[in-house]
Image: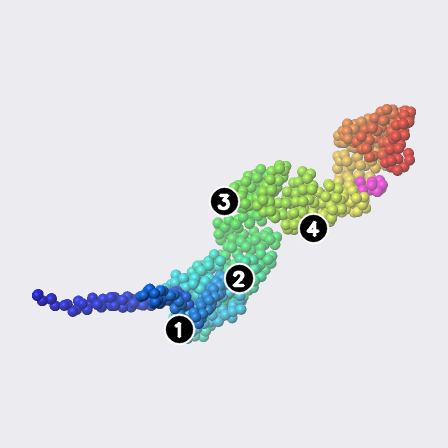
């Protein structure tokens, strides 16, 4: 039998130890890598570890609370057989405790998740400032501590600002990227980090990372500050104190920006005030004092504190003479204050600093337009279009200047171009609609105002303009409805007088004179020097029979405009209604002195002479009125009255016939011609005219009585009695 080869003891040993050794090496490597990960991102790794531990605990508790065990029990028959029996692995008390623990753990997790989510949401709504540890001898000089103390002093009770202090040092090697990632984990908006070396000329570097630049837009995404100071200033802590104040000023400024963008203007201004209070006139670290004054000025402009805003823009310019936006906004404030000369000076400076500042040219052009310097206005709007051919407002404004010059077609071309660029620009439809109104193209005008209201259903100016067009078209109910809407949606003050006037006119045309007078009253409150409003209120008083008040209004019209011939005519009519014919004749004389070609003045003066029974003078005036206006039926009718007074019935019949020719629906002309025929004994012709007068105005009793007399003269007693009865029925008086 051959001998066995000798065993390789070393080889066998390695085979036995390989798996344990490999496992040990793997564990060491895993622990080492875990440690390196923890050093690089302690918070994340710790969170993962805690989460894994929690999962293990839950699994273990679940095992204790719900696991089962199976045992096999011997039975007597059949012999050797076993049956399985399943039961809880642990005792009932243990299971109860574990299950209660799981419920508590689950509820705690849910509450914790809710509180964490709520906390993170609250942080998102706050301005979160994260301050990392500064690399340097902080225990000696305390630069970061001073910054923290100032921030806590100013913001510890501020619900909108959260100060987060971490002990991590962000090194130069790690840099801004690491600082920003660290800030994101804390939901920070701003991260402050840096280092300093206390040499004779200390090397101090402070980094400011802006993680929400779209919200905190005045600050760059990453800013590096290297303030100049001395070792003596460090040792005396004067530099640290100033650094703390200026950092607090920066945070207050940024919080003010958030308030401003949220339309909390008073709060924003208060924060800007604190920021300026903490800043020296010549800051040592930050260089944004001009910005603080600038944004405070804008906030004050938005709450209409324009004089204060101008002072802030002055300060901003003082700290930064090349601040073109400060000049621009100061120009805007001056413009709103009505100081157009200073506004133009500010815009001049803005475009001098920045020749491509399109909006500064736009606003300067608007000031020129307001001042009536249309040529320069158009030059500025042309310049805006040269800089930016897609600037819709430039076309809109240039169109408005063309409209002011009466160049409506050119205005519409500009408005069309503005609409091509920005179809949702509400103002352009308003203005183009007004241009169409000026051209008498009322349907197009209404279409544009409709479009303006489609874009902005609460646009008061569009309602006012459309209401004005409806007024021209005689649609007075729609006029009133549109102007009511204009008031409901907050029409601008300078437009109020036009709205009250137009609505008053619409009420007057509908015969609602009391309402018309109420609107005229309001219009006069807003524009007490406007004679047109007094004239229309006087007319309304006249229709109500309040002639004395009408005369008072016409007196005011004449006081404001002594050359207004129409005012004298209107006052003359009021005097005539009061039967003060001599006064009325004096007013008509004055009207003719101012306008010798006024046919109405002759007509009304002729009527005054007629009522004074000065028929020859009346006929002379009626002749002149007919000469100036041969188509005036009233002049012929009134001259017919005068001829009747003189017994010249043939001439009066000629005049009544002419009046009927010009106005076939004038029942009064037929009635008076019938009287003239009756006086001449031509009863058949008289009856025909009385028939026509009754046909045109069946409820007028006047023709029935003379027609009855005409029938009686012809021996037609039945017809005569019927007319007398109708007359008594309509008047309540026996003939």
Q: State the separation of the CA atoms marked 1 and 4.
A: 71 Å
Q: Residue at x 51, y 46 (%)?
A: 391
Mark 2: secondary structure: helix
Mark 3: secondary structure: loop
- SS assignment for the magenta stretch, majority: helix
Side of 570 relative to 47 (left or right): right
Q: Residue at x 79, y 35 (%)?
A: 603
The residue mark sitting in front, 4 or 2, is 2
Display coloring:
rainbow
Q: State the separation of the CA atoms marked 4 and 2.
A: 38 Å
Q: In the image, which disc is placed on residue 137?
A: 1
Q: State the separation of the CA atoms marked 4 and 3.
A: 39 Å
Q: Where does the image place residue 13, in percent across and percent down from the top left?
A: 19, 69
Vertical side of 303 occupied by 514: above or below? above
**Among numbered discs 4 and 2, the one appearing first in the sequence:** 2
Magenta segment boundaries in residue numbering:
573-583
Q: Please name the residue that numbered disc 3 is placed on.
A: 390
Mark 4: secondary structure: helix
Mark 1: secondary structure: loop
Q: State the separation of the CA atoms marked 3 and 2.
A: 33 Å
Q: State the separation of the CA atoms marked 1 and 3.
A: 57 Å
């Amino acid at each position: 039998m051959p001998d066995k080869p000798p065993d390789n003891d070393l080889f066998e040993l390695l085979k036995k130890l390989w798996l344990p050794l490999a496992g040990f090496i793997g564990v060491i490597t895993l622990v080492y890598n875990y440690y390196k990960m923890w050093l690089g991102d302690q918070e994340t790794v710790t969170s993962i570890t805690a989460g894994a531990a929690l999962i293990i605990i839950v699994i273990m508790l679940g095992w204790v609370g719900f696991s089962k065990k199976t045992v096999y029990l011997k039975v007597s028959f059949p012999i050797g057989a076993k049956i399985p029996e399943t039961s809880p692995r642990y005792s009932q008390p243990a299971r109860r405790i574990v299950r209660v623990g799981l419920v508590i753990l689950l509820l705690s997790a849910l509450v914790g998740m809710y509180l964490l989510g709520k906390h993170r949401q609250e942080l998102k709504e706050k301005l979160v400032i994260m301050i990392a540890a500064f690399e340097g001898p902080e225990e000696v000089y305390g630069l970061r501590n001073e910054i923290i103390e100032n921030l806590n002093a100013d913001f510890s009770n501020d619900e909108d600002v959260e100060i987060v202090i971490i002990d991590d040092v962000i090194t130069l090697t790690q840099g801004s990227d690491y600082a920003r990632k660290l800030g994101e984990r804390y939901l920070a908006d701003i991260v402050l980090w840096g280092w300093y070396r206390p040499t004779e000329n200390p090397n101090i570097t402070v980094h400011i990372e802006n993680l929400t630049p779209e919200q905190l837009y005045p600050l760059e995404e990453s800013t590096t500050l290297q303030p100049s100071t001395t070792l003596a200033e460090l040792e005396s802590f004067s530099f640290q104190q100033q650094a703390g104040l200026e950092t607090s000023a920066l945070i207050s400024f940024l919080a003010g920006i958030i308030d401003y963008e949220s339309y909390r203007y008073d709060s924003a201004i208060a924060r800007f005030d604190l920021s300026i209070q903490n800043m020296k006139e010549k800051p040592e670290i930050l260089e944004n004092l001009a910005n603080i004054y600038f944004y405070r000025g804008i906030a004050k402009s938005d709450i209409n504190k324009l004089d204060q805003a101008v002072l802030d823009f002055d300060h901003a310019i003082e700290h930064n003479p090349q601040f073109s936006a400060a000049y621009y906004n100061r120009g805007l404030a001056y413009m709103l204050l009505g100081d157009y000369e200073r506004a133009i000076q500010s815009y001049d400076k803005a475009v001098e600093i920045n020749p491509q500042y399109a909006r500064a040219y736009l606003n300067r052009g608007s000031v020129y337009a307001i001042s009536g310097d249309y040529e320069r206005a158009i030059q500025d709007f042309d310049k805006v279009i040269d800089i930016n051919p897609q600037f819709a407002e430039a076309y809109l404004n240039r169109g408005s200047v063309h409209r002011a010059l009466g160049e409506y077609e050119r205005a519409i071309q500009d408005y069309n171009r503005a609409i091509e660029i920005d179809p949702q620009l509400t103002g352009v439809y308003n203005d183009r609609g007004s241009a169409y109104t000026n051209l008498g193209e009322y349907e197009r005008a209404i279409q544009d105002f409709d479009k303006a209201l489609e874009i902005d259903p609460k646009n008061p100016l569009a309602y006012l303009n459309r209401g004005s067009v409806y007024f021209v078209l005689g649609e007075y109910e729609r006029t009133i409805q549109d102007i009511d809407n204009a008031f409901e949606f907050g029409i601008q003050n300078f437009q109020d007088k036009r709205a009250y006037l137009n609505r008053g006119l619409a009420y007057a045309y509908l015969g609602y004179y009391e309402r018309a007078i109420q609107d005229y009253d309001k219009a006069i409150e807003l524009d007490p020097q406007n004679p047109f409003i007094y004239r229309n209120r006087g007319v309304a008083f006249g229709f109500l029979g309040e002639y004395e008040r009408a005369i008072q209004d016409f007196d005011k019209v004449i006081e404001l405009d002594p050359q207004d011939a129409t005012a004298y005519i209107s006052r003359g009519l009021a005097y005539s209604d009061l039967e003060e014919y001599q006064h009325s004749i004096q007013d008509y004389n004055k009207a003719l002195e101012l306008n010798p070609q006024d046919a109405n003045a002759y007509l009304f003066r002729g009527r005054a002479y007629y009522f004074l029974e000065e028929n020859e003078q009346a006929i002379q005036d009626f002749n002149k009125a007919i000469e100036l206006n041969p188509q005036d039926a009233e002049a012929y009718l009134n001259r017919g009255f005068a001829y009747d007074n003189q017994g010249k019935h043939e001439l009066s019949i000629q005049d009544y016939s002419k009046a009927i020719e010009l106005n076939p629906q004038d029942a009064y002309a037929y009635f008076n011609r019938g009287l003239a025929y009756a006086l001449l004994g031509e009863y058949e012709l008289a009856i025909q005219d009385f028939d026509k007068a009754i046909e045109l105005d069946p409820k007028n009793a006047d023709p029935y009585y003379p027609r009855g007399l005409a029938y009686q003269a012809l021996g037609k007693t039945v017809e005569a009695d019927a007319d007398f009865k109708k007359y008594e029925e309509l008047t309540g008086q026996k003939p």
